[in-house]
Amino acid sequence: MKKGFLLNLFILVLSCSIPYQNFAQKREKMDAALRSFIETPFMQKFKDLKLESENLVLTFKENKQNYSAAQINRVKSAYQKTVDKFNAQLLDIKADFMNERKLQYIQDFPEDYTSGLTSDINDLTSFYQSNLQLTVHDVTDATIDGNSLLTLVAELAKLVPGMVTSISELRSSVKKFEDTYLEEKLIVPYKFKSWEEIIY
Amino acid sequence: MSKQSILYILILLFLQNINIVAQNSTNKQLDPALRKFVQSEIMVKFKDLKREAENSVSSFKSEMNNFKPDQIQKVKSGYDKTADRFNQELENMKMDFLNKKKLKYIIEFPKDYTRSLELNFRELAQYYAENFQQPLQDVRQSKEDGGIVIALFLELFKLVPEVINHFNEMKEMAARYDEAYLDKWLVTPFKFLTWAEIQAEAGYNNLNNTNTYYNNGINTNPYPYPVTPDPNAVYPPVANQPLPSGGIDSTKTNNQNWWETNSTVPVPTNVDGTAPVKNQNLKTVPSKSKAPDPFSPAPVQKDTLKVKPTLPKING
């Protein structure tokens, strides 16, 4: 009887550990694949962009006694609109990572995906120029010109092909990613902060 | 009958069949879905762009003797490069129609395809401006801003999303399209002509133009250079040719025309340096590749892609 009990216990422990092992293996694969993506020059530039834009807001906030409430609101709204666009782009990338068919499409036709994404980044560049940069330039009388940010966005478009290659490579090890995983590893670290979150 | 002769007959029949299939694909009428696409606004704009570019070349050709060979070469190579790019885009579109997997993806992820097409058109616009429009303006010393072309491109960008609807409509029929069929209906009518295929503008042609190297197919007149100019002829002033500052005609050196001093250009012995004469003997040679007109009225709607077997007529 004792023998039978031990055997049952062993089987129970074993069967419980299998899903955990599977999960750990899957997680390991996802980590390796996402790490190679995050290390692409595109994502590094994206992070630079995020830090630089937050820095711009910080500089503005430090001198906010020089501006009227209306002026501050103008910059705040321009910033918010611009970062919403950038964050939407990040969410689009996340959605693509969670879509098995889309990952397959990227692997099969990387040039199309590259052109599409480049087009999106070009739009982001124009949006930044005509919203945040123009407003900051106007309100601060060109004390803050926002040119460093513009250079970064423009460079981002050139880095798209490498980023797409990385996506098609990761597709061979991971078929699709999970929402919570991407939220933790991709969205939280790369998402642009809101105006209120930027404090000095 | 021996086994070998049966085999020969079979091979012959097979080859004949291949030939018939190939002929059928090009003889097929334009199917309604593809007709709708080639008549769509975006394709009409594409054709307008093609015409604008070809007209610019045509006008340039009719005043070509006013320019130096390197200037002509600059415009010619700019045009040819630009035309190649546009034609490549058409080829890409054709390949997308032929690739079933791609068609599926386009319908599944329309935004990606739209964005990618939009970028391609934007790049084409930039390429057109930098490689053809700019050299043309530089050479002509013209201040034309190419407003029509810019407007056409802007309209083209706006119309890109509608392409997806056409892909959607065509997805079922597309399985029956083959390369020859799409070449006939999609590529040939919209393809930019090469420099050599474009005729100089009718009405005014400078027969003193000795640059036959750049002007293939224009001087079909067997006696292009009159021995003595007609003293009663009235010659229009050369358009778009403001003299450079100082009033010096840069096309002349030491009172000679540039072509007389340029040893690289073949100069016929009877060139007398006279003013351009009106063209009276020039025939306009139709373009080699006669494209079908997808804008012609639609025939009675029926499934024209179905290959009808050609039955032999039985008399009596």
Image (cartoon, rainbow, N blue to C red):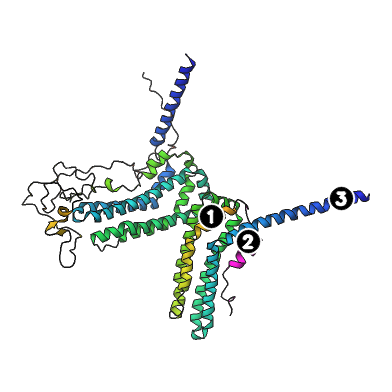
Residue tagged by mark 1?
Answer: A165
**Mark toward the start of the polypeptide (3 vs 2):** 3
Q: Residue furthest top?
A: B1
- Quadrant where the C terminus of chain B sits is top left
Q: Name the disc covering residue A116, or none.
A: none
Residue tagged by mark 3?
Answer: A8
Quadrant housing residue B60? bottom left
**Mark toward the start of the polypeptide (1 vs 3):** 3
The chain under label 3 reads A
Is residue B218 shown left or right of residue B313?
Answer: left
The chain under label 2 reads A
What is the spatial separation of the Cα atoms under label 1 and label 3, in whole angstroms?
A: 49 Å
Quadrant housing residue B131? bottom left
Amino acid type at circle 1 is Thr
Total number of numbered discs in the rendering: 3
Residue tagged by mark 2?
Answer: A182
Q: Is residue A170 above or below residue B175?
A: below
Amino acid type at circle 2 is Leu
